[in-house]
Amino acid sequence: LVFIYGGGNIVGSTDEHLLSNLYDGHALAMREQAVVVTPNYRLGALGFFADPALDAESPSRVSGNQGTLDHIAALQWVKDNIAAFGGDPARVMVFGESAGAINVCSLVASPLAAGLFSSALMQSGGCGAHSQATQKATSAALARKLGCTSDVATCMRSLTAEQIVAATDGFGELLKSLTKLDPTQGLVGVLPWSSSVDGYVLPDFPLKVIAAGTHNKVPLAVGSNANEGVVFAQPGLYLCSQYSSDLKSMFGTNADRVLAQYPCSFWQPRQAWIDVVTDFLFTCTSRHAARAAAASPGASVFRYFYTHTADHGLDALNGAYHSAELAYVFRTFAAKGYTASAAELTLANNIEDFWGSLAATGSPAAGAVRWPGYTTASEKVLLLDATLSTSTDARAAKCNFWDSLYPAGSGG
């Protein structure tokens, strides 16, 4: 089980140290009798900087996907070496959360990753990538910020990694950029640094590659959480007037239609914003990925919707927030200072068994209930909560609305 962490492709590491490491793979490895691998990868400009001079010196004649190539190198290492650790190189699942899930989708779409994994799972992140033009524009803006206006490659190499990282906008700026994103780009529109379509690592935008059926066709699970947007909501007083202004900044001429679909009540303007972010950037991008993959003949696709609210503690205030499921995947409740109830330990057992079964067999069949396959006809979804259940789609009417404004894949 190879896990790619999130953090907007600008922060994060395999040691996500809160009170302890959130990504400690020990419990997951023990329960599933599997080897858990958590590779680091280059982030921000170090992972995704693109420049014509770098293109010219590269054997592939392209640049900007260094971080993605790190993921591919890690998977190649696993294929070559994991047997020495008791692992099976023929049964490798790559999975990731948030930006890590977006990166997983890039691997599903990349011909360079062909044969390096046998299943894939995306937690709270859709499919998307930047164009090379966007990647180079972002890179050039950072170079100018650092005083590199000519012979950019040589100038950037004269700087320390610390200088480059310090000049890169942090996660707080990423959150502010929510109201400035290009809505046709979905979640990737929020991320200044991500994989890009270079014709080598990525032949086209990932969703288009998958829809065309030219991707790495492996069993795929994709899902999201019911209250993702709470971690992207600005703290403090938030009024309906600010909500309306944010919608106009984000959706332009479509803002009034969004407001009609997600009206603002005097008592809950913040929740209205949370619901918009949750559905637009996560619930419905999850459906885009599942639908695109399920369109291929014989495809094996599974979709989940995580709805559990923690029984107590600070987590109980935020519902099924972005990344809430990670403590259950890794059974690392202590990292969040949280003691799980008996029912929550059972939920963790089921999540780990679903994940482990997908890795071992290509089908997440080992949980307490049957996880139905996802097809474009049935659109069955597994609801992950203390009591497992299944449903037809998740917030279908909301996703139909978003698709009417921004059709899946319209911006890549």
Image: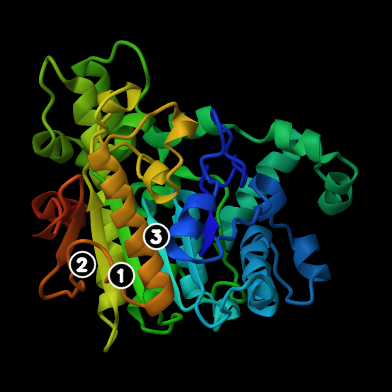
Q: Tag 2: residue type? A: Trp
**Residue at the image position 46 percent from the left and 40 percent from the top:** 332
Q: Where on the picture, by quarter, is residue 327?
A: top left
Element marked by disc 1? loop
Tag 2–tag 1 contact (CB < 8 Å) = yes
Question: Quick one: 44 or 37, which is closer to the camera?
Answer: 37
What label does residue 353 carry, if any?
A: none
- Earlier in the chain: of badge 1 and badge 3, it is 3
Residue 171: image quadrant is: top right
Q: Which residue is mark 2?
A: 371
* Amino acid residing under circle 3: Met
| Residue that appears at 22% across and 17% down | 241
Mark 3 or 2, closer to the camera: 2
Disc marking residue 364: 1
Q: Residues within 10 Å of mark 1 (few under 14, many from 20)?
A: many
Quickly name the residue at label 3. 122
